[in-house]
């Protein structure tokens, strides 16, 4: 699927998001004019999902608001790269922009992206469901903060074959339809599963709870293991051995 040289020119990406406020009460107090928009979103969630029908607007805010850039916050952006040693054994370098200041997280990522595009114009960003979640989320946040984005991120004006994104979800679909989670994919491909981390908690709202309990370092580590898992998926699909060691932190 991908050669070693192609793999070395890919940047793996994942984000972690939380609710903008610790609970619905604080959200309502700080943004009273936006409450009606969350009420509409919550109503739609209850209509579309049977198990949510008994949940209040407040319940759904704590469990689902992180999924929407209009109501959530980016608390961690992790990027990573596959490298190969002299024996062609893959290793992984990771770096994260994280913290409570969402604008700084977004700005740091955009500045990195601009620099890497200038250095390697044909570089591509890889993620699981990156085309439908991670990158749209980041772009909307950049718009909110009036941060200028690189030309390669002007997706409305990009031909399909010029797109700088590779989505492992789409690769797995193989032109078919349906959704498969990264957790399920790693299980099928016998890859270490980052969703087993305690911070994940295997439910909606687990990441938000971790953030509001001050577990930023744990969130960063989890996010970096996520991108390593995505890299391993692509390595396996390209018939390379997966990365076994823990992701190393890239200081540059």
Image: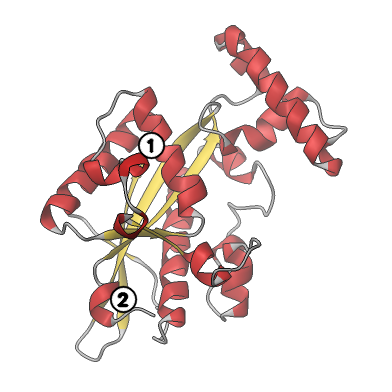
Residue shown at 27% from the left, 34% from the top: 107
Q: Position of residue 209 (x, y in %)?
A: 61, 39
Identify the secondary structure beneath mark 2.
strand
Residue underneath mark 1: 139
On screen, residue 92 above or below 116: below
| Crowd around label 2: few <14 · some 14–19 · many ≥20 (10 Å) | some
The disc at residue 31 is none
Q: Residue placed at 45% from the left, 66% from the top?
A: 230
Which residue is at the front of the view, 49 or 20? 49
What secondary structure is found at the residue carrying circle 1?
helix
Q: Nearer the viewer, residue 179 or 26?
A: 179
Query: Which one is nearer the viewer's eye here, 119 or 60?
Result: 119
Q: Mark on residue 91?
A: 2
Residue at (40%, 39%) from the top-left corner? Answer: 138
Relative to 6, is 37 above or below? Answer: above
- Residue 172 quadrant: bottom right
Q: Quadrant of the C terminus?
A: bottom left
């Amino acid at each position: 699927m991908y050669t070693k040289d192609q793999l070395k020119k890919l940047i793996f990406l994942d984000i972690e998001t939380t609710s903008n406020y610790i609970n619905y009460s604080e959200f309502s107090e700080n943004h009273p004019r936006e409450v009606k928009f969350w009420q509409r979103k919550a109503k739609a969630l209850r209509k579309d999902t049977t198990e949510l029908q008994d949940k209040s607007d407040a319940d759904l805010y704590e469990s689902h608001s992180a999924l929407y850039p209009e109501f959530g916050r980016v608390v961690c952006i992790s990027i990573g790269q596959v490298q190969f040693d002299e024996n062609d054994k893959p290793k992984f370098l990771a770096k994260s922009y994280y913290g409570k200041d969402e604008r700084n997280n977004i700005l740091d990522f955009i500045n990195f992206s601009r620099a890497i595009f200038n250095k390697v114009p044909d570089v591509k960003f890889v993620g699981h469901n990156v085309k439908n979640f991670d990158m749209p989320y980041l772009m909307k946040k950049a718009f909110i903060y009036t941060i200028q984005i690189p030309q390669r991120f002007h997706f409305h004006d990009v031909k399909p074959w010029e797109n700088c994104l590779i989505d492992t979800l789409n690769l797995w679909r193989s032109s078919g339809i349906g959704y498969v989670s990264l957790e399920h994919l790693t299980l099928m491909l016998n890859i270490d599963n980052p969703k087993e981390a305690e911070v994940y908690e295997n439910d909606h709202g687990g990441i938000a709870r971790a953030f509001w309990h001050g577990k930023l370092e744990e969130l960063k580590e989890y996010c970096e293991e996520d991108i390593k898992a995505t890299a391993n998926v692509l390595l396996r699909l390209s018939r390379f051995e997966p990365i076994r060691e823990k992701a190393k932190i890239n200081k540059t």
